[in-house]
Image (cartoon, helix red, strand yellow):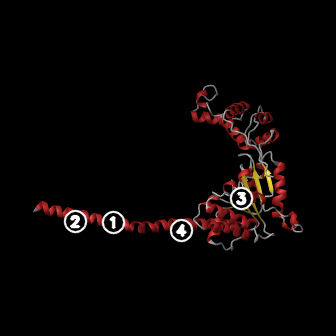
Amino acid sequence: MLPAVGGIVVSFALCGALIYALVTARRLPQLTAPSTECREKRKKTEAQKKVEKILRSFGLPDIELTLHEMKIAANLVAPEDVNVTWEDIGGLENLTNEIRESVLLPLQQPKLFSRSRLMQAPKGMLLHGPPGCGKTMIAKAMARDSDARFINLDVSTLRDAGYGESQKLVSALFSLARKIQPCIIFVDEIDALLQSRDACDHETSVQIKAQFLYLWDGFIAEPGDRMVIIGATNRPQVIDTAVLRRMPAQFYVGLPDERQRAQIIEVILRDEEVSEDVDIAEVGHLTETFSGSDLKELCRRAAMLRVQGASQHRGGSGHSNCTVEEEMYFSASGPIKMANFTHALHRMKQTRPQTYSPIDLD
């Protein structure tokens, strides 16, 4: 009898445990939902506070935004948060001056250009060229200096939304821009969003492009709107022709020539301690096919070469009683020498990428 009773007790215990597990599994979503909902609510609250702070800095504290406009407004950039100025862009004076005169000035001084529609700012501007040559830096300088509201559009904001949400967000992008104009919408790697339409395109992608083009320069577009869409790409050949038509101001930001490379190096080194034996013109001559970002990396490597090997040569530097960390400090605090550039240049030339060929957009 006892074994039988024990078996019954064990069976009841197992059944009870199974029932408890099933009930808990059913209630688990209900138990976790509040915490997930709280986290999402907290994120929305933080995003809303950030947007309200930016709008106050723009002098627009009382503007009313829809939920979708609020999501787009999270991409707004306050000028004081941008640490790039026109003086930080070396070797592109002619290009930057043309952009400031033909694009920014009509936005900043609309009354000066109100008598003629031909003198208004273009609806779109395209910066194209090889990577690392200053396209994004130009956009940052425009955000800081334009006196216009600047939306740094995150493409994933539109592409990763649910079905039907993407079109609403595109509409919110343009409605927000009109509410806060003058406004610049910057789309980095614009080819990822507005590439040539194809029969194999996903339905959502087709709808995003159609909605974007319609609101940009369609039937309901107002001629007096002070909005400029700026795109940056190193693949202009894959952008839809309808998009290129809406970007009449197209600027090729190419690889710098020898004079421009020297100017870029001077800008990079302006706050650094440089030895008198450094010949910047010679460095510019030796760095053919280097982009602006390549030159910055060259200067960084040259600076870092001051500390490499410090621990192996402690005895010959005059600081033999110092620790390794102190020795590295003494080495790093010295000026950058021409030998550092020569060594860094030799290393970089061993891993040079292929050059970029400009594309004819006509």
Tag 2: Cα neighbours inside 10 Å, few (<14), some, or many (≥20)?
few
What residue sits right under mark 4 in the picture? 41
Residue situated furthest front in the rendering: 199
Q: Amino acid at mark 1?
A: Leu
**Residue in the picture at 11% in, 61% down:** 2
Q: Amino acid at mark 3?
A: Phe
Residue toward you, 42 or 129? 129
What residue sits right under mark 3 in the picture? 186
In the displayed structure, does residue 23 sit left or right of residue 96? left
What residue sits right under mark 2 in the picture? 12
Tag 4: Cα neighbours inside 10 Å, few (<14), some, or many (≥20)?
few
Question: Do tag 1 and tag 3 residues touch (Cβ < 8 Å)?
Answer: no
Image height check: is 222 above or below 309? below
Residue situated furthest left in the rendering: 1
Task: Tell me how far mark 3 sits from mark 4, CA to CA.
Answer: 28 Å
Task: Tell me how far mark 3 sits from mark 2, CA to CA.
Answer: 67 Å
Which circle marks residue 22 in the picture? 1
Q: Position of residue 133 (x, y in %)?
A: 74, 46
Tag 3: Cα neighbours inside 10 Å, few (<14), some, or many (≥20)?
many
Mark toward the viewer: 1 or 3: 1
Q: Position of residue 115 (x, y in %)?
A: 89, 68
Q: Secondary structure at mark 4?
A: helix
Q: Position of residue 196 (x, y in %)?
A: 70, 56
Q: Amino acid at mark 4?
A: Lys
Task: Tell me how far mark 1 sits from mark 4, CA to CA.
Answer: 30 Å
First along the sequence among labels 1 and 3: 1
Task: Tell me how far mark 1 sits from mark 2, CA to CA.
Answer: 15 Å
Question: Do tag 1 and tag 4 residues touch (Cβ < 8 Å)?
Answer: no
Which circle marks residue 282 in the picture? none
Mark toward the viewer: 3 or 4: 3
